[in-house]
Amino acid sequence: MELLSPAGSSEAVIAAVQNGADAIYMGLNNFNARMNAKNFSDIELEKAIKYCHVRGCKVYITLNTLVSDREIKEAVKLALQAYTMGADAILVQDLGLAANIHSVEPNIQLHASTQMSIHNLDGVLMAADMGLSRVVLARELNWEQIQFITSRAPIETEVFVHGALCFCYSGQCYMSAVIGRRSGNRGLCAQPCRMKYSIDGCMDEYPLSLKDNCLINHLGELKSSGVSCVKIEGRMKRPEYVAIVTKIYSNALKNSTPVSEENVALLKRTFSRSGFTDGYFTGLKNDMNGVKSSDAAPDHFFARVRKEYLNGESKRVPLNLYVRAMHEKPIQAVCVDDEGNEVAFEGAIPELSLNHETTEEELIAQLKKTGGTPYYYDKVEAKIERGLFISLSSINTLRRNILSTMTDYRGQTRKEKNFSQNSLELLELKERNHCNSVKPKIIFQVFSENQMTKEMAGLRPDYIYLPLNLLVKASDKLSPFLEMGVVPVAVLPRIIKDVDVNKVQETLLRAKDLGIKETLCGNLGAVSIARKMDFTVRGDYGLNVFNSWTESYLKKIGLSSVTLSFELRLAQIRSLVDCINSEIIAYGRLPLMVTDQQIIKEHSSGNERRRQEYLHDHYGAIFPVIRTDFHQNEILNSKKLFLADKIEELYMCKLWALRLLFTTESSKECFDIANSYMGYTKYKPNELTRGLYYRGVT
């Protein structure tokens, strides 16, 4: 099982490799989910890859952010540059970017970043169909779920075992973007989950800040389940942190023994948030909140750690050496490394011995001196014909040349493939057909039964989106909409773990019996489930459609429409190629987070749970929290997105549909808002926002 360590700087590369990492992951200067890390220039990247490969360590490059139409060519170019320099794989989030990288160079190994939010077997199968070779699973999975997926997956799985936990499912957090224009999906998360919030009036709490993950005592379970790689989080951490954590995990994997309390204490001193948690892995999620601890190790402790990994070579590669010396011929040497790479070299012509004849034992003893290099000899064989003398300087020169040649061979790049930016041919897309007369369709999305009124049906929207469970439960409320010709669409949960798949399928069958033919899916796994049951599939915002090529890919796999990311500006939306019918959320409390944490607690008087809760920040903003039917809580924006007075600008975007997203609104407010968008009134809600459609994200 591979140990994958973070490298946010050149020194962190050394720290990881010298302390036992089998692979490292690192970001370039653009398009990675830790844009505030130091990251690597082209020269630094090439040096780092050579350093790692010489020592038997793989290098993965993170290009795991969403990219715009203007940026995608540059992102593909970066992937190709990393590949030609020798990178072993590229981590991606953006579906359109992944498709384009493989179209230009199919041999590049692509890994699905945890930002893809893949959390069930169907999602893994979709990634495999895309040509990805590995999936980084969502951190929220327990051991049984990981085991279920891994035992059936046609590609490799990777699991985070140590480091920071996001409160929200990775790739589904929009809080930093919506409230501060710093997008987590673009690598600039401002970590709003580490701020204070109040629930029930207590502001001195950090209800969204989780302890750091630590699965040091569960490595055996992960290995037995078939996981290919375990990953340490921390590209923003200091190199000494990387060194300590990597060494402890590396030793635990090698020794297959329980980790000592001393090493667990060392992990806590290195960095923790009120200790550690394994709550997601074990399913015991009652005590997962924590803040950064103040009892970190002193600087002199880190200085000692730094000295250790900067001096000497602890990551050494075994070699086998075969040498033969004969009369009047150059010495012949063949060196083979642990991967079967073979280099041959010729040395000096031996002299005839006058006083001393060089023995095989003497030659072997001198050649085996590899101190200060990343090698050691596991086996050395030498054959010398009688009567020959080989000088010490000749042997030393031979030894240096052998090791130098092996280093060059192990550190070579793929530079014979020279991709220039001008020669990159991205996947062809159909040009937009500009049509100023088309008005977008209107979609009502409801959250509760009381929002499905006859008055709303009387406004005759084109579609009504409603949660799958609500659709089946309140099918009688749907009748007035059906009578008006409104098309109902079942909204699948963004998070459907494998344990819930059967339940979802059973409910979809009931929906099909009611005449429902269409679904809205915000995750690749959900898309797969709906497609297999022959539903028409529409893409929701959770698929993070940020460019035309992602639109094109989703059309290719059978989606009939997509919801564009609400992190796009209207100007960017107008410039998208018309590959597929596209909609935007034009009204509503934008979803900020979806989490397995239970912000909404049980009533003290019984087991009935509240349907809604509120978070208050220190600026006075109030964020509603709602509970879904499949175990998650969702945090909504404090302000309501409102664009009814900008309707002409929305028409200019040539959209297929505008969606009005109703969550916490009363039936009256739903009716007032809908009337406003249909041009019947001038109603505006209090505390409105224009979202990111004009401001955009950084």
Image (spheres, rainbow, N blue to C red):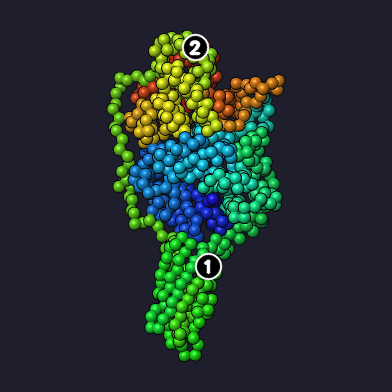
Residue 656 lies left or right of residue 55; in this view the side is left
Residue 659, placed above or below residue 408: above
In which quarter of the view is residue 254 placed? bottom right
Crowd tier of the residue under label 1, counting other residues whose Cα lies within 10 Å: few below 14, some 14–19, many 20 or above: few
- Where in the figure is residue 644, as x and y percent of width and height? 43, 18
Q: Of helix, strand and loop, which one carries label 1?
A: strand
- Where in the figure is residue 162, as x and y percent of width and height? 59, 45
Residue 694 shows in the view:
no
Residue nearer the viewer, 524 or 309: 524
Crowd tier of the residue under label 2, counting other residues whose Cα lies within 10 Å: few below 14, some 14–19, many 20 or above: few
- Where in the figure is residue 55, as x and y percent of width and height? 50, 60
Residue nearer the viewer, 301 or 98: 98
Q: Of helix, strand and loop, which one carries label 2?
A: helix
Residue nearer the viewer, 439 or 276: 276
What residue is at 62 percent from the left and 36 percent from the top?
283
What residue is at 43 percent from the left and 82 percent from the top?
350
Q: Which residue is mark 2?
A: 476
- Where in the figure is residue 462, as x and y percent of width and height? 39, 16
Contact, CB < 8 Å: mark 1 with mark 2?
A: no
Residue 439 shows in the view:
yes
Task: Measure the alpha-carbon separation of dots 1 and 2.
Answer: 76 Å
Residue 400, placed above or below residue 172: below
| Residue placed furthest toward the bottom | 354
Residue 603, placed above or below residue 125: above
Q: Which residue is mark 1?
A: 378
Q: Amino acid at mark 2?
A: Asp
Residue 4, placed above or below residue 347: above
What residue is at 44 percent from the left and 49 percent from the top?
89
Q: Amino acid at mark 1?
A: Asp
Tell which circle, 1 or 2, labels the residue nearer the N-terminal end: 1
What residue is at 50 percent from the left and 18 percent from the top?
472
